[in-house]
Image (tube, rainbow, N blue to C red):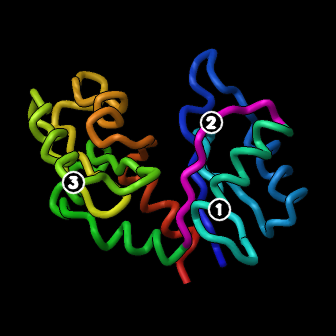
Amino acid sequence: MLVIALLRAVNLPAHNKVGMASLCEMLLDLEFGSPRSLLQSGNLVFEAASGTSSSLERRLEKEAQRRLGLETDFFVRTAREWRAVLAANPFHAEAKRDPGHLLVMFLKEPPGGGAVAELQGAITGREVVGVVGRQAYIVYPDGVGRSRLTTALLERKLRTRATGRNWNTVVKLGRLVAD
């Protein structure tokens, strides 16, 4: 099965530096097939013989720490789950008009009862959020850099870890795992 793994907060200035070639080599050593990366921000595509998303996440986190000294979260979705991410986007008009200001935040766990309402109540700007399963779709009309709706706030309100990718990257990764 084809799998996408997203790494959280890698290759930021002076933080969690790791080469994509090193990650692909690690995947080969772990006997995952055909590893490749997209961009330098921790987007991996590979073949896995078996395993659930959560079991693959745990294994990759452990091995990245052990082999590369990299302590970060991995967010794994199968190709079928990725197609569902693309299809579930509640902001189709924004995706077409301004895909750079639409982010998908991939979550470790789906938010529990009341968490989404809590997040909605914490928004002080013009951002709009839609949560579907283990993804939060966020429109940042004024840009992510100016927003007070940060990853830290989102994680605190939804009570789970997250990593984000803009819609352009989500679509590109979708093309890599298309049937």
- At 53% from the left and 77% from the top, the residue drawn is 178
Q: Residues within 10 Å of mark 2 (few under 14, many from 20)?
A: some
Q: Which residues make up the magenta segment? A: 68-78
Per the image, the residue denoted by label 1 is 55
Identify the secondary structure beneath mark 3.
loop
> Residue 97, position in %: x, y?
19, 54
Mark 3 or mark 1, which is nearer to you? Answer: 3
Labels in figure, total: 3
**Quadrant holding the C terminus:** bottom right
Residue lying farthest top?
A: 14
User: What's the residue type where badge 3 is placed?
Assistant: Gly
**What is the spatial separation of the Cα atoms under label 3 and label 1, in whole angstroms?**
25 Å
Q: Nearer the viewer, residue 87 or 108?
A: 108
Q: Quadrant of residue 176?
A: bottom right
Which amino acid does the dot numbered 1 rest on? Ser
User: Disc 1 and disc 2: Cα gap in Å?
Assistant: 15 Å
What numbered label is drawn on residue 72? 2
Q: Answer whether labels 3 and 1 touch (C-beta < 8 Å).
A: no
Residue neighbourhood size for the residue with mark 1, other residues' Cα within 10 Å, grouped as few (<14), some (14–19), many (≥20): few
Residue 45 position (above or below residue 10): below
* Foreground disc of the pair 3, 2: 3
> Residue 106: x and y, percent?
42, 51
Q: Residue beneath label 3, please?
A: 113
Say if mark 1 contacts mark 2, CB within 8 Å. Answer: no
Q: Horizontally, is 90 left or right of 24 in the view? A: left
